[in-house]
Amino acid sequence: MSDSDPPEEADTVREAVDRSRSGAPAAGAVVRDRFSSDEVFQRIVAAADEEITSTSRELFFSGLAAGFAISITVLLYASLYGSTDGHPILSALLYPLGFIYIIIGGYQLYTENTLPPVALTLERLTSIPALLRHWTIVLAGNFAGGAIGAAVLARGGVFSDDAYEAALYLGTHGPETAWWDLFFKAAFAGLIVAGVVWVEYSARETIARLVIVYMAFLAIPMGNLFHVVTSFTEMAFVVFAPAGDLSPVTGFTQFVLPVLLGNTVGGILLVTVVNYYQTSEHRLESARFASSVSRLSPREWLLGRFAGRSYVPLVDTVEETAPDANTYRVLVPIANPRTESRLVNFASTLAAEKESAVVHVVHIVQVPDRFSEYSGAQREQTVAESNRLLDGVRETVESYNVECETSTVVSYRSFEEIFTTAERKHTDLVVMGWEPNGLWDAARAERPLSELTTQLPCDFLVLKDRDLDTSRVLLPTAGGPDSDLSAEVAQLLRSSLGSSITLLHVVDGPDERVAGETFLENWAADRDLEGVTLTVDDSGDVEAAICRAADDHTTLLIGATERGLLSRLVSESLHFDVVNTVDCSVLLAERPNGRSFLQRLFGRR
């Protein structure tokens, strides 16, 4: 090539030289056709986020389905074992079918779950108690499904005579094996299963995943290894079978227990930890919002929700706040800053009446399933858009001469994040909206909703907004702490907005009217509500009386009952038809009960 050749021509010739005859680059960077260890770890963390935030119902029934699938493996293994006289290869050919159903179908299998949740725990993104809860529920579902399948196989006439005898042998072969032999055989099986999860997340195609799963689980019977759910199902078959002679206690302690421990140790120590430490310090990039990754404190990691948080959301820009008895903190969780301005204005109105108050508006974004499909750029865009919308919210709050804080939380379990944020910010009052089929109604929660809503961290006001107008407020009362909260809100509305307040008390008949009037007068006087309108209804029908009185009012303010109004609202068991039938806005007020022993022990609010 001469010096006179144009640069463009020289580059073209060089490019041609640098290519092989097949057309692939012969030099330079080559596009990888597989994920790096960091990328595999990121995919596992994204999947673990979805698993660890699943409800108990979701986990149990997914585990139940996996248990049913394992009974298919037992059925086919015993059938081939009997028809081939125990041939070590032929009898095992269909053993992996149940596991293929489970992994490709996305069911929850205990051994398959030794990897994803542990990855979150190692990163201190979820607590050890949360991990143990996850395992316990999945294992219970697996055992329940396996037991049902074993009972049908034992009593339903499914097996041929040869297969029946083979199933009896397989179920008694385990208990006859030495305890420590079972443990170490199961440890190798745990290594295989957890390794399958790691490799399966690195596969790009379904066919490759099928081959991986089939070959890996074929190794368990061929290597005379033991899988805990399969072992439990085989043991349960012998227990249920008329010809069986095995005590459930013996079967569990001498067979299932060592296999369970071996699978767990093999899955965690031999694969999960080793694979974790082969990744780099940048392993969480793209799996989480890199700019906002935080971790549980050592105390939270060990004790979970008893010491504070048990899980770190995908995005959590909330900063911990120290307790301050001189500052009244109002938390306003919103799902859409554009449409919940009235809720923010209402909370700011209440806070403005306090001598020193802070309104903390938290934008909680509930992500859909398989959040890992979103790119890092899309995630960062979500946070940036949230911050932009919250700028307008901050201006609204500050117009009331109230200090404002804003933050963003992106999570699978938006409803529980309200409670977690309230505890971390040492909140005095939560003001939140509620609409049928809304965000909070459909959100996941690690804890049962009934437990969440009966152990409130602070006072709660829940607004069902119907063009909120607080000019004429109706407050039905029968006494109690929740009515006290309603009275405090009514007092704030009267002093800040000049609201007209009507107190309503319902008695069982005309002969109780005088006592009802005396009660209402004393109740109002004790709560600095002198001069308000007092109404006593002697119909004895509380809901009908509230509906009649609400026709002349713009806002209905109701306190919770002894069973918890918010708890029944969340669980859709609220039978106050008045909440849904009146035309005015409704405010539901609930005050927390006393703290439990564990809350006092671990210092929770």
Image (cartoon, grey):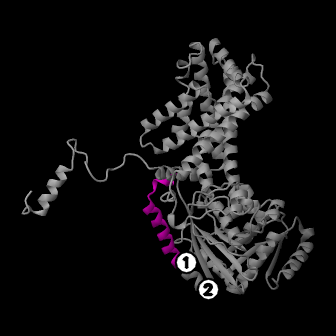
Q: Amino acid at mark 1?
A: Val
Q: Is residue 576 visible?
A: no
Residue nearest the viewer, comparing 433 with 58: 58
The quadrant in which residue 253 appears is top right
Q: Rounded to the nearest whole Å, what is the CA distance between mark 1 and mark 2?
A: 12 Å
The quadrant in which residue 375 appears is bottom left
The residue at which mark 2 appears reads as: 400
Q: Position of residue 138 (x, y in %)?
A: 66, 42
Q: Amino acid at mark 2?
A: Tyr
Mark 1 surroundings within 10 Å by alpha-carbon count, few (fewer than 14), some (14 through 19), many (20 or more): many
The residue at which mark 1 appears reads as: 393
How many discs mark residues in the rendered view?
A: 2
Residue at image position (44%, 42%) is 203
Q: Position of residue 86 (x, y in %)?
A: 59, 15
Residue 423 to residue 130: above or below = below
Q: Main secondary structure of the magenta part?
A: helix
Residue range (magenta): 369-392
User: Which quadrant does the C terminus fall into?
Assistant: bottom right
